[in-house]
Amino acid sequence: MIDGSNYAFRIINKYNTRGYCVNMDQFNVLQEMDDMKKKFIHIKESLKELLNKEQISIEDILNYVRQIREITCELASRSYDSLTGEDAKNLDTAICKHIYDSINEKEKSSDITELRKFFAWLDMTSKKCTNEIFTTNYDLLLEKSMESNYIQT
């Protein structure tokens, strides 16, 4: 679930109600590159004005940056809203890397013991029909626990 509040993103599931959060105030896309950080802040402020809303989610920012990438053909010689195509590509990559690193860090420390037990039980049930699991969102912890039990996803 993407939350438009002060959080960059929040993934919520029924097994881990805390979810994964990155606070937008602490979201330093590239600390070592002040220029890129300024561009991130500029894009965020532009979106507040364009969308006429105070809270801008990371999904809003990524969508806008990707639109800029597309209309500039990722060229350094073309720009839109003070962002060149090349800068848009680099900013998109940096944001996604930060999100991936944040999720990966949380995933490594997650306890999947209960999920593994559930999938072991599910795998032992009737083999005559396909077992299906329905969830409101795709969950990496579910996939990780199935893989650790050698269940094909």
Image: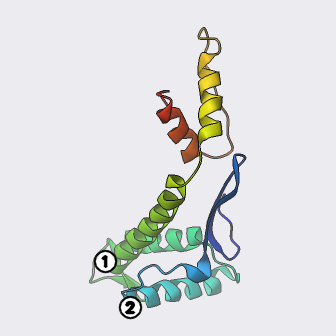
Q: Where's residue 61, x and y in %? A: 54, 74
Residue most toward the top? Answer: 128
Q: Badge 1 local density, few (<14 within 10 Å), some, or many (20+)?
A: some
From this view, report whether residue 136 is shown above or below residue 100: above
State the quadrant of the N terminus. Answer: bottom right
Give the SS element for disc 2. helix
Which numbered disc, 1 or 2, marks the residue that appears first in the sequence?
A: 2
Q: How is the image coloured?
A: rainbow
Q: Which sits in the foreground, 76 or 143?
A: 143
Q: Which sits in the foreground, 47 or 58?
A: 58
Quadrant in which residue 54 is drawn: bottom right
The label nearer to you, 1 versus 2, is 2
Can the viewer see residue 81?
no
Q: Which sits in the foreground, 108 or 3?
A: 108
Q: Which residue is drawn at the image coordinates 72% and 46% (left, top)?
A: 14
Q: Please indicate whether residue 82 sits to the left or right of residue 42 in the image.
A: left
Mark 2 highlights which residue?
A: 35
Q: Which residue is drawn at the image coordinates 64% and 23% (left, top)?
A: 121
Residue 96's tag is none
Quadrant in which residue 96 is drawn: bottom left
Give the SS element for disc 1. helix
Task: Report the amino acid beneath label 1.
Answer: Glu
Q: Where's residue 21, x and y in %? A: 62, 66
From this view, report whether residue 43 is shown above or below residue 58: below
Q: Are marks 1 and 2 in contact (CB under 8 Å)?
A: no
From this view, report whether residue 135 is shown above or below residue 36: above
Mark 1 highlights which residue?
A: 86
Q: Where's residue 110, x and y in %? A: 57, 51
Q: Which residue is drawn at the image coordinates 70% and 81% (left, top)?
A: 53
